[in-house]
Amino acid sequence: MSGLSGNKLNQLVLNWPRGTVCTTGWLRKLGFSRQLIERYKKSRWLTSIGRGAYKLTNDPVSWPGAVYAIQEQLHLQVHPGGKTALQLKGLAHFVPAELKEIFLFGTRPQKLPTWFKIYDWAVDVSYSLTNLFDKGLGLSQHDFGSFSIKVSAAERAVMEMLYLVPQKQTLNESSLIMEHLVGLRPTVVQELLENCNSIKTKRLFMFLAEKHDHQWMKNLDLSRVNLGPGKITIVSGGVYDSKYKIVVPRISG
């Protein structure tokens, strides 16, 4: 390998955040030709994880390192949210040592890259395309050591979790998680409620917040929140809450 190519490779290896994926497009922007990328692959410095994506050989990567590439290199509005964000923050009712399922959220009509979908990340991936909030609202950085990614703040995460009820998330588990969310920031909750595009989500959020008698509720101004008209049925044959006009599954406990 020539000295010039060797120097470029050294810089690439030194500056590559460990545990992350790098896309072909990003490598090209950094000045690496297709021929040079192929040479690094043949010499086993790089390993392909699918068409258009690589990792450093012998560097273990997991789903957060892939989301890093999706956010920082492909500039897609995709982020971990819902129960996953709460688990990452230690706020879920039960946090396993290793996540078995992750919930990702994206803005319509964005699709996950094929290399992400076909690679085995050792977790089940649930991807929801929504226009629940304006982009960027209620997101925060989460540190993974050598890199960080945008994830939902707790206030947005719980609303995303409720958005998935009952198709991908049970109300019973959501209630158990929300019971412990005593530290939500009312100013953030207020902004999210005012900008949430799902009437169902807002009603479920207020229903559970009231059920658990959270103190931060006292600082909310619901006169500025559109809770919509009419009855919403979350599940047939459930229990009707007349205040928030929703039919919900019976919650244990």
Image (cartoon, rainbow, N blue to C red):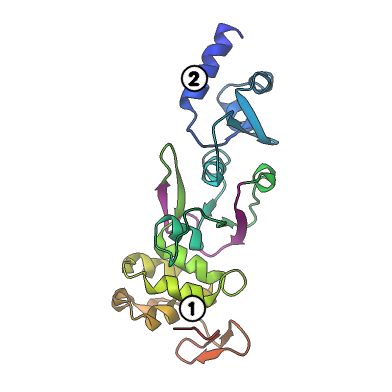
**Most foreground residue, 28 or 174:** 174
| Quarter in which the C terminus is drawn | bottom left
Which residues are the magenta region?
Answer: 121-142
Any part of residue 199 in sight: no
**Most foreground residue, 2 or 225:** 2
Instruction: Name the disc covering residue 11, or none.
Output: 2
The quarter of the displayed image where residue 95 is located: bottom left
Residue 140 is covered by the magenta coloring: yes
Looking at this rendering, what residue extends furthest in the front direction?
A: 97
Under circle 2, the secondary element is: helix
Residue 17: give x, y in percent of width and height: 47, 33
**Most foreground residue, 73 or 146:** 146
Residue 246 is covered by the magenta coloring: no
- Above or below, 230 against 12 in this view is below
The residue tagged 1 is 204
Count the labels in the image.
2
- For badge 2, the amino acid type reads Gln
